[in-house]
Amino acid sequence: MEIKESANNIKAIFRREIGGYFGSPVAYVFIVIFLMLMGFFTFYISRFFEVGQADLRNFFEWHSWIFMFLVPAVAMRLWAEERRMGTLELILTFPVTVADVILGKFLAAWVFIGIALFLTFPMVITVAYLGSPDTGPVICGYIGSFLSAGAFLSVGIMTSSFTRSQVISFIVSVVLCLFFILAGYPPVTEMLSGWAPIWLVNLVSSLGFLSHSVSIERGVLDFRDLLYYFSIIFFMLFANGIVIQNRRT
Amino acid sequence: MIEVKNLTKYFGAKKAVDNISFTVEKGEILGFLGPNAAGKSTTMRMITGFIPPSDGTAVIGGADILTDAVAARKKIGYLPENAPVYPDMTVYGYLDFCAEVRGFSGENRKKKVEEALEKCFLNEVKFQTISTLSKGFKQRVCFAQSIIHDPEYLILDEPTDGLDPNQKHEVRLLIRKMSADKAIILSTHILDEMDAVCSRAIIIAKGRIVADETPFNLRTRSSLHGAVSLTLPPTDTEKFISCIRGIKGVKEVRIIEKEADTLKVRIYPENAYTPIVNGVVTALSDHHYEIKTIFVEQGRLDEVFRELTV
Ligand SMILES: Nc1ncnc2c1ncn2[C@@H]1O[C@H](COP(=O)(O)OP(=O)(O)O)[C@@H](O)[C@H]1O
Ligand SMILES: [Mg+2]
C-alpha cells in the first residue's frame, strides 16, 4: 500500500519534471550543446578520423569531462527553482515523503540526460560503418556514461538543496565532480602518496571514477563497479533528504 | 477536528510563535487575525507540516503532524501565502498534477480537476499557461489546488490577498459554502473579511493569542459598543447635554459634529450590557427634541484590534 502510494507520488513528480524539461527551450539548448561538444572533442581534439582506429574509447573518455559541467547545470535548479517560486511549500505539504520528491526529481533529470546520451548514437553508427567495433564495449561504455552522469547528478541535486543560489550550487558541484574524476588519476595519486598515509591514498583513488570506468569501458560489467556508482547516488540523495528535512524555511 | 497544542517556533533566538493552542471543529470558520509579522503564516506552516515546530504539535483529525505526517497532510487542503504555482504549466496541467499527487487516477482525476475548475471559475483559462495569468487568477488556481480533494480541513493563508472586490466577494462566498462539513482556518489582516466570513476569531500579536472569540463578542470589547449615535436639528447644546445627563445609565455625552443644519452626538452608557436607547428616546420626546437619525453602535473591530495588538 505504502509502496504503491510512493510509486504513484514518484511517478507524478517525475511526469511534472520531465514535462518541464521538454516544455522549455533549456532542454533543447542543453541537448544541442551536449551533442556539439561531444562531436567537437571526439572528432577534433581526439582526431577520431586520423588515428584510424574504429573504436569508441576516445568518445567515452570525454563523457565524464563534459558531464562534469553540463550535469550540474541541469541539477542546480532542481531545488533552487522550487524555493524561488515558493512551490517548495506546496510540494512539501502534499501527502508525499521527501524521499518521493527527491526520487521523482532525480529520475526525471537522469532520464533526460539519458535521452541526450542516446542521441549520440549517430557516432556509433559512423563507427560501425567505418569498421566493426565490438558491441560489448560500446554497450558497456554507454552504461558507464549513464552511471557516471547519475552520480554527478546526485552530487548536483544535493548541492542545490543547501543553497538558494544556483551559481553557488553549480560551482560546488562542479568542484565535487572534478574531485571524483581526478581522484583516481595517476598524477594525483602520486602527488598524494608523497605525504599522505597509504590508506588515504587508496581511499581517495578508490573513490575516483577512473578505475571503475576503465573496467566498464573494457566491456566488463562488474558488480562492484555498479555498487560503486549506486552507493554514490544513494549517499548523495540521502544527504539531500537530510538537508531538505532540516532546512530552516 | 484540528487540535493545535502549544505550538512554538524560534527562528534563531527570535520567538516567532509563542505557545499557541486552540481547536477548530467542523462547521467552524476560524479567522486568524493579526498585524503583519504576528506569526500567522508561521503557525499555519507548522500546522501543515511545512516547518517543524520548536515545541508542541498539531493533530489533524487524529493524525499527529509530527508522527503521522503523510496521513495528516492527506486530510488537509492548504493555500500557502502568495499562492505558489508552477508558472510554466497550464492551469489544467497544474491541477492535474495536484490531483495525481493526491492519489486520484483515470476518469476520477479528470472529474476532480473539472470540478475544481468549475468551483473556482477557471474554465475560461483552462489551457492557459499560468505565467500569463493575472494575480487574481493565480490566486484562484492555487485555491483550486487546495480544494481539489475535497479535504476535511482547509488552511488558507490570506486567501483573498491581491483580489479585486468582486473576486474577494466570490471567494468568500465559496469559503462559506464549503464550511458546513469542513473545519477551516483562514488568516487575514482585513477586519471586514473576518467579520464577513468567520464564525470565530483568534487575534494574535507578537506570536501570542490575545483574543479568541466570536466576531460579535469581539465587538463588545469596543468602548463604542452600546453607545447611541444621534443626529438632530441644530439646538442649544448646553441644554441638550444637561437633559441627556439626567437619563439613568448614561455615562457621557460627546458632540461629534456641529454644523449649520445638524448636530451629531454620541451617548455612552455606563455599562455596555444595559441598553440606554429607550431612556434616551423617552427623554428626548419628553423634551420635544426632534430626532433625525438614531443608531445603536455595535462596536468597531478596528478599535478592538488596535487595542489588542499595538
Ligand atoms: N524563515 C524565517 N527565518 C527567520 N525569521 C522568520 C522566518 N519566517 C518568518 N520569520 C519571522 O517570524 C515572524 C512572523 O512571521 P509570519 O509568520 O510570516 O507573520 P505573518 O504571517 O503574521 O505576517 C516575523 O517577524 C518574521 O520576520
Ligand atoms: Mg503571513
Image: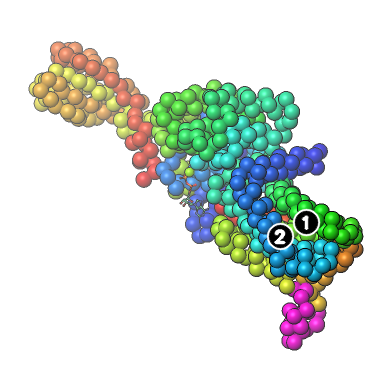
Q: In the image, which disc is placed on residue A38?
A: 2
Q: Is residue A189 above or below residue A225?
A: below
Label 2 with label 1: CB-CB less than 8 Å: yes
Find residue A166 and report its image quarter.
bottom right
Say which chain tag 1 marks.
Answer: A
- Helix, strand or loop at disc 2? helix
Q: Is residue B299 magenta?
A: no
Taking B258 as reference, is B38 left or right? right
Mark-to-mark CA distance, 2 and 1: 9 Å
* Disc marking residue A109: none
The residue lying at 65 percent from left, 36 percent from top is B98
Circle 2: residue type:
Met
Pointer 2 indicates a residue of which chain? A
Question: Where does label 1 land, which residue?
Answer: A123
Closer to us: A168 or B157: A168
Q: Is mark 2 within 8 Å of ligand 1?
A: no
Point out residue B57 in the picture as x, y percentages from the top left corner: 62, 46
Residue at image x 78%, y 63%? A60
Residue density around tag 1, few if under 14, some if 14–19, many if 20 or more, within 10 Å: some
Q: Amino acid at mark 1?
A: Met
